[in-house]
Amino acid sequence: NQDCLDTIQVSNVGIMAILDDECRLPKGNDRNFAKRMYEQFLPAKNMSVSENTRFHATKIQQAKALFSIRHFAGLVEYNADTNFMEKNKDEIPITAKNMFENAPTELIKDAYAAQTRQNLAATSSGRAAKQKTVGQQFKEQLNSLIENVQRTDPHYIRCIKPNSTKSPLVMDN
């Protein structure tokens, strides 16, 4: 499955990197995101399957901004025209900001203010800090999980079936 993970998250050329890069462009959009993926994973004119066979997009799919990823369980189709860019930016809508700032309870106001202060503290030397996209947050969380698993010594519990009838207090010989 490493080739599937690489297709999705490898630096600079994976799907998440392409999505994050497209989000940074002033005129970035879902169609350009799809086009850049096709160019990255299907560079030859008549290709519909990537070299590692994880990325798929027929000419018909490409015309509709669709692509498929072959995961462990099988081929899954995605539609790039479903606001990938907007969802990846993870910005709080103006109405939600107003709701948090004018919340009826102090707890919500304080929590929102603390988050705002934390975001402001992240800025360095007067420049605005880049807001992390959903893709970047996911990648950081996944890397953290992998590090935690590698630091531990996992133990597995084997389940024992005591009897074929699955009845309580009965043990087969």
Image (cartoon, rainbow, N blue to C red):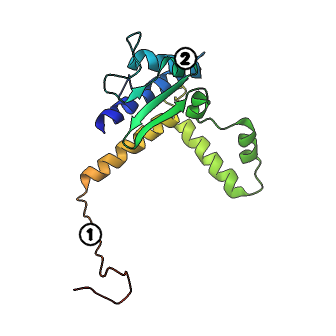
Q: Count neighbours of disc 2 (C-alpha within 10 A) and say few if under 14, some if 14 to 19, many if 20 or more.
A: some
Q: Residue furthest front?
A: 165
Give the camera-side residue of 82 and 123.
82
Q: How many marks?
A: 2
Task: Please state which of the two labelled residues, at mark 1 or mark 2, is closer to the viewer.
Answer: 1
Residue at mark 1: 158
Relative image position of residue 156 (x, y in whole percent): 26, 64
Residue drawn at x 36%, y 49% is 145
Q: Residues within 10 Å of mark 1 (few under 14, many from 20)?
A: few
Q: x, y (%) of residue 146?
A: 32, 47
Kindly identify the residue that appears in the image at 43 percent across and 14 percent down.
39
Picture coordinates of residue 120, whole percent (x, y): 57, 36
Disc 1 versus disc 2: distance between alpha carbons?
Answer: 49 Å
Q: Nearer the viewer, residue 55 or 172?
A: 172
The kind of residue on which mark 2 rests is: Asn
| Any part of residue 33 in sight | no
Residue displayed at 53% across by 38% down: 121
Q: At x 41% / y 44%, what residue is drawn?
A: 141
Secondary structure found at label 1: loop
Q: Quadrant of the C terminus?
A: bottom left
Residue behind mark 2: 32
Q: Is residue 157 above or below residue 135?
A: below
In which quadrant will I find the N terminus?
Answer: top left
The amino acid pointed to by label 1 is Arg
Q: Is residue 158 above or below residue 41?
A: below
Quarter of the image where one finds residue 75: top left
Q: Nearer the viewer, residue 102 or 57?
A: 57
Q: Earlier in the sequence, mark 1 or mark 2?
A: 2
Callouts 1 and 2 close, C-beta under 8 Å: no
Residue 80 seen:
yes
In this rendering, would 172 be left or right of 54? left
- Is residue 163 shown above or below 36? below
